[in-house]
Image (cartoon, rainbow, N blue to C red):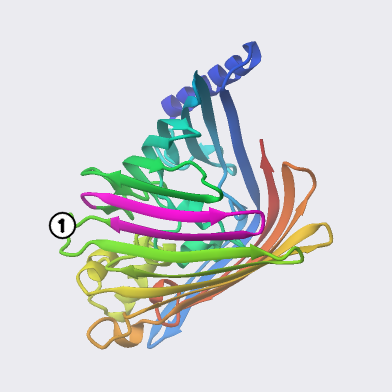
Amino acid sequence: MKKQAFVLALIGGFGMVLSAQAETSVTLYGVVDTGYGYSKHEIHKDGINYTAKSSGLHDSYLSGSRFGFRGVEDLGDGLRAMFILESGINPGNGTTVTDRVFHRESHVGLASDRWGSITMGRQYNLADPYFGVNATASMGDIDKTFGAASVRVDNMFIYQTPNMSGFQAGVGYAAEGAVVRTDVDPDANNLDRNSYLTLGVQYRDEALHAAATYDRVGNGEYANAATSWALVGSYDFGVAKLALGYGQDRYAKINGVGAYSNEALFSEVFTEAGSPVKGYEDYLATHDFKASNYYVGLSVPLAGGTVGMAWGRTASNLDDGDKLGDYAGDQNIYSARYVYPLSKRTSLYVYGAYGTNIAYIEGLKAQEAGLGINHSF
């Protein structure tokens, strides 16, 4: 860790020296988000008594804390080179999220207003930038409902068309060696298969946004490929912004079961219940898993700030008799937040969420609340 800290300090210092010397295309940017938070997961059913609580300093309720370097170089004739190197941080203790220095994003590419762009490296799937309909955050985030709303993939190529009167499309592919979601824990929760395909198309104007996305993680050791598709859209009425989404997942949740893919939560409850589930990924891939996902979000300006409310539902077939039966249920998460800007870069917020049948476990409830400050630079 000392070596990693030294490398980060050296890179940061080098970036600041560049900025101080003369005109440059390299920008240091980031977000620090932290405050007080409380969370609770509990289930009391059929002899199962499981409760987990936490409270105290909590980061990234509104957005993930991070820092990064973004660079653009004009190559002439409308062509430019670009790169992003981005790392997640824990403001509470000053550490990075994983042992990877730039685990959030690390890619380079070329872009043209006429021909579009191609990027190569660790980067988000197309659903992440194309969705754009989040009304709340943390447990209420849309990625807790949709299986591929925000996924980072190693070794991926992505091509995107230029903006054509509001329309844009893209395709991305990672061959053998694609690893998904090592942003949380490099040794766990990874959907490690042979290939990754992401497709997307979107339309944006001042008020309307609509998008369709498709993601597929290749077979690898599993007989079936994990797939996820979604249709999302939002419209800004001026007095309020309404967002809607629908989609389906098959043979796995690419970003984890309801994004609660840390197997400790999923398997500990089922171990107490005597279920044969050993690991959710193996189980879903071999049991014809299917889930339908729904999202409704509403954002309303209020007293100089913005109120956001959301409902996310994901209904699976795990309650079929030959699967998990009575131990499975449909996940619902209700959430709300209020964000008050002190400036263009600094905001105060309060947030709360309540969920039922978390990770499709019948009777597993979750509560979350927090308040904090979000500062970008």
Instruction: Answer with the quarter of the image where residue 40 lies.
Output: bottom right
Q: Residue at x 80, y 47 (%)?
A: 342
Residue 325, above or below 222? below
- Give the residue at mark 1: 221
Instruction: Mark yes or no: residue 150 visible.
Output: no
Q: Position of residue 323 (x, y in %)?
A: 25, 81
Q: Is residue 234 magenta?
A: no
Count of numbered circles on the image: 1
Instruction: Mark yes or no: residue 26 visible.
Output: yes
Choose between 57 and 360: the one closer to the eye. Answer: 360
Residue 321, above or below 232? below
Instruction: Say left or right for 68 vs 154.
Output: right
Q: Residue at x 49, y 36 (%)?
A: 86
Q: Main secondary structure of the magenta part?
A: strand
Q: Residue at x 41, y 30 (%)?
A: 108
Q: Quadrant of the N terminus?
A: top left
For label 1, the crowd category at 10 Å Cα-Cα, with few meaning under 14, some 14 to 19 and many 20 or more, is: few
Instruction: Answer with the quarter of the image where residue 243 lies.
Output: bottom right
Instruction: Answer with the quarter of the image where residue 135 lies.
Output: bottom right
Q: Position of residue 184 (x, y in %)?
A: 42, 49
Q: Which residues are magenta?
A: 193-216
Q: Quadrant of the C terminus?
A: top right
User: Which residue sits furthest right?
Assistant: 303
Q: Position of residue 130 (x, y in %)?
A: 49, 53
Choose between 238 and 218: the one closer to the eye. Answer: 238
Choose between 261 and 207: the one closer to the eye. Answer: 207
Q: Which residue type does callout 1 highlight?
A: Glu
Q: Is residue 211 magenta?
A: yes
Q: Position of residue 18 (x, y in %)?
A: 58, 15
